[in-house]
Image (cartoon, grey):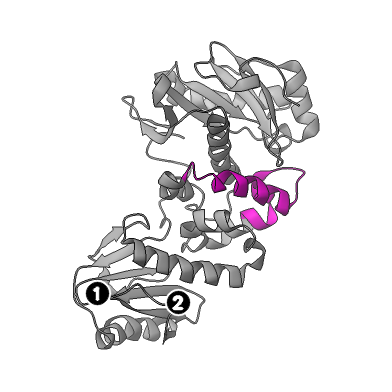
């Protein structure tokens, strides 16, 4: 993570969220205030939902000719809008709420609609229910739908020398544990809010999921996205040890100016030591070399180079869950064989 203002991520619309209207709605108002303006602008079809809405609510789907989708569910006293299309003006001043903040019945209904839509469009995702659910807010976002789906479909979720099934299975296993459920919106949002398919940034995002697995497998509870006194947001805090953790994922030398694997590590870490780690020198740096192919990783593993910050742990995951690496400095957390400086095979 970098400072709260993320210069590398343009300010664009984030993952989809509900808009909450604390007003009374009825079908005639839905047709006049929502369907009519969308139909005039995009061409829109108002239809019954695929699944029954929660008790006490009515619902409709609004499908645009350009492929956009909106869901609207209402009762006598409130309504919720969710979509990746332009919001009708009548809802502009309404509050936004995440899936976790909306009533459970409303959220569950909307998720069923969106998951069915997602799996109809991307049938390869249907076997990965936890990946589908966790990243649903970005798989359907206005700016990130195409790029996030492509990242998992065409790039094995960031694993080199791996196929899609292997990459998806890794994150399906991780997310099925539920360790990140309470932080779903925060974590999913990191993947799907960039203009264009920024593979470097997306691989770096998945490094934070890898770090979560590393911490959880070692038995540590953690809190993500921690703002500290320096004005930065660091990736994790482990409260039991009062330890701050920052994650970075170097690109291998074939993708950057650095001529050797060790130089690629140091170049990436340098960006952290002149910013977050300069102001938080005791933070543990997790250097995720998962993007490195076998030959580049072997050079790192055998040479165990210093990376420019201590304490640090350098490691690489494989899609089957294996991890190997080494530590440098007085690491404040027990991370099993990595912090014992023993290679795990």
Q: Residue at x 55, y 58 (%)?
A: 132
Is 245 left or right of 304, judged from the image as shown?
left
Residue 11, percent from left and from top = 40, 51
Q: Residue at x 41, y 45 (%)?
A: 182
Residue labelled with disc 1: 90
Distance CA(mark 1)–CA(mark 2): 26 Å
Foreground residue among 98 and 253: 98
Residue 333, percent from left and from top = 51, 19
Above-or-below relation of 148 to 60: above
Quarter of the C terminus within the rendering: top right
Foreground residue among 202 and 58: 58
The residue most toward the top is 330
Residue labelled with disc 2: 51
Q: Which of disc 2 and disc 1 is earlier in sequence? A: 2
Q: Is residue 175 magenta?
A: yes
Above-or-below relation of 139 to 328: below
From this viewpoint, is residue 135 visible? no
Above-or-below relation of 189 to 244: below
Q: Which mark is residue 254?
A: none
Residue 3, percent from left and from top = 40, 34
Q: Residue at x 27, y 73 (%)?
A: 89
Foreground residue among 102 and 84: 102
Q: Residue at x 72, y 53 (%)?
A: 165
The residue most toward the right is 295
| Mark 1 crowdedness (10 Å alpha carbons): few <14, some 14-19, many ≥20 | few
Looking at the rendered structure, the secondary structure element under dot 2 is loop
Q: Which residues are magenta?
A: 151-180
Looking at the rendered structure, the secondary structure element under dot 1 is helix
| Mark 2 crowdedness (10 Å alpha carbons): few <14, some 14-19, many ≥20 | few
Is 111 left or right of 170, judged from the image as shown?
left
Tag in front: 1 or 2: 2
Majority secondary structure in the magenta region? helix
């Amino acid at each position: 993570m970098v400072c709260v203002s993320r210069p590398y991520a343009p300010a664009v619309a984030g993952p989809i969220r509900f808009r909450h209207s604390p007003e009374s709605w009825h079908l005639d108002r839905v047709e006049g205030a929502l369907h009519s303006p969308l139909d005039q602008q995009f061409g829109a079809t108002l239809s019954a939902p695929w699944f029954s809405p929660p008790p006490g609510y009515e619902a409709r789907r609004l499908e645009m000719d350009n492929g956009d989708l909106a869901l609207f569910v209402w009762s006598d006293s409130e309504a919720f809008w969710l979509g990746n299309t332009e919001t009708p003006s009548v809802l502009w001043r309404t509050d936004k709420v995440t899936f976790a903040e909306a009533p459970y019945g409303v959220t569950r209904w909307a998720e069923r609609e969106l998951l069915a839509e997602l799996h109809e469009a991307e049938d390869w995702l249907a076997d990965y229910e936890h990946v589908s659910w966790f990243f649903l807010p970005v798989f359907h976002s206005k700016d990130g739908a195409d790029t996030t789906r492509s990242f998992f479909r065409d790039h094995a979720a960031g694993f080199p020398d791996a196929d899609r099934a292997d990459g998806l299975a890794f994150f399906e296993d991780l997310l099925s544990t539920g360790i990140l459920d309470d932080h779903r919106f925060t974590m999913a949002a990191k993947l799907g809010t960039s203009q264009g398919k920024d593979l470097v940034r997306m691989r770096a995002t998945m490094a934070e999921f890898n770090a979560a697995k590393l911490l959880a497998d070692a038995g540590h509870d953690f809190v993500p996205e921690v703002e500290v006194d320096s004005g930065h947001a660091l990736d994790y805090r482990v409260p039991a040890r009062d330890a701050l953790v920052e994650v970075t994922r170097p690109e291998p030398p074939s993708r950057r100016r650095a001529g050797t694997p060790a130089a690629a590590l140091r170049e990436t870490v340098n960006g952290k030591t002149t910013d977050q780690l300069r102001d938080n020198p005791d933070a543990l740096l997790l250097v995720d070399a998962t993007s490195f192919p076998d030959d580049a990783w072997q050079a790192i593993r055998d040479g165990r180079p210093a990376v420019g910050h201590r304490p640090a742990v350098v490691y690489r995951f494989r899609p089957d869950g294996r991890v190997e690496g080494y530590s440098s400095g007085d690491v404040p957390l027990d991370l099993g064989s990595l912090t014992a400086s023993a290679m795990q095979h």
